[in-house]
Image (cartoon, grey):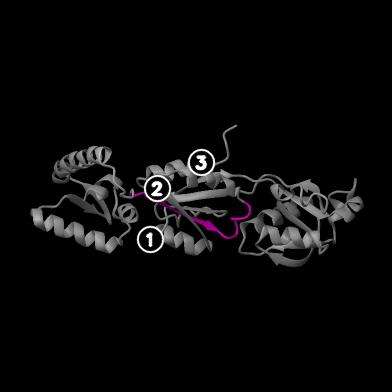
Amino acid sequence: FHVIATEGSLARASKVLGITQPTLSAQLKQLEEHFGTRLFDRSGGSLRINSNGRRIQEITHEMFRVGERLDGIFPGNQPRILSRLEIGISTTVARSFAMDRFNALFADREILTRVRLGDHEYLHHELLTSGLDLMITDRPPERRGGRGTAHRQLSSPEFVVICPAGEAYKHEGQLPHSLNRQPFIHYTSHSAYRFEVDQWVKETGVELEIVAEADDVYLIREAVVSGVGLGVVPKRLVDEATAAKVKILCSLPRTFEIHAVYMRKDPSAQVLKALDLLADPAD
């Protein structure tokens, strides 16, 4: 009861306690039957503590405060129960996002952060069914299909056109017309990046010869290094190790966006903290 009341939902409480939501729901029902009264009001699948629950919560707060004082006197070797934060990252985004931003979350000893990759649709389903607290994607949900979700832009990475280093001289002073009829490694239709690249191609009027498609930005970069053709990748992928092998020809408008999606109703303190840590620093 105390964890449900503190976390504000069965979904979050089940993650903190490490037990399934149905089991926790059954235990709460047994407790209410024992006291002969409801402790939470139920509406639309959500729980809201009522006056009876608040009276009990006052007592459980005092119980846990006494327990903490006892732990301070006799700490023993009992492991602490950590809050859990479940984050999913769309596979089309994972390598475009600055993954070192997770380090601050991983370093927080009060939260057990778990990060996993997956398809956008699968992760969105997991978010809606309480399997995730937060998902990171290049496709924010449409308003009509949001189903109670909210989203926040985390980043707008700069993308650049790259070519094999030995081919750069062909484009000097000739861009963007020198890109016409050049072999090009494009993104697949599953990636939102394809739409942004297609828009840029349309606006510049160039005609590229698509010779391969991929979702992985590293795979596209390595194909360019191998001389397969041109590619568009995040600028941060052109590091010191690859600068001698590929050359940046030009930058695209910063229309590429990476979003965090979460449930709009009562986001936990851990979710709000993660949003701040994962977002681009404020100017």
88 lies left or right of 99: left
**Label 2 sits on residue:** 264
In this view, which residue lies farthest toward the top?
283
Question: Identity of the amino acid at label 1?
Answer: Thr
Left or right: residue 10 versus residue 127 is left
Secondary structure of the residue carrying tag 3 is: helix
Q: Is residue 2 left or right of residue 183?
A: left
Give the x, y percent position of residue 22.
27, 63
Q: Residues within 10 Å of mark 1 (few under 14, many from 20)?
A: few
Q: Which mark is residue 277?
A: 3
- The stretch in magenta equals 81-96
The percent position of residue 157, horizontal first and vertical second, equals 65, 46
Q: Residue at x 85, y 58 (%)?
A: 180
Give the percent coordinates (x, y) of residue 203.
75, 51
Disc 2 residue type (three-letter): Arg
Residue at point 49% right, 39% down?
A: 276
In the rendered image, the residue lying farthest to the bottom is 211
Dividing the image into 4 quarters, which one contains the C terminus? top right
Write down the quadrant of residue 213 in the picture.
Answer: bottom right
Disc number at residue 129?
1
Task: Tell me the tag on residue 86.
Answer: none
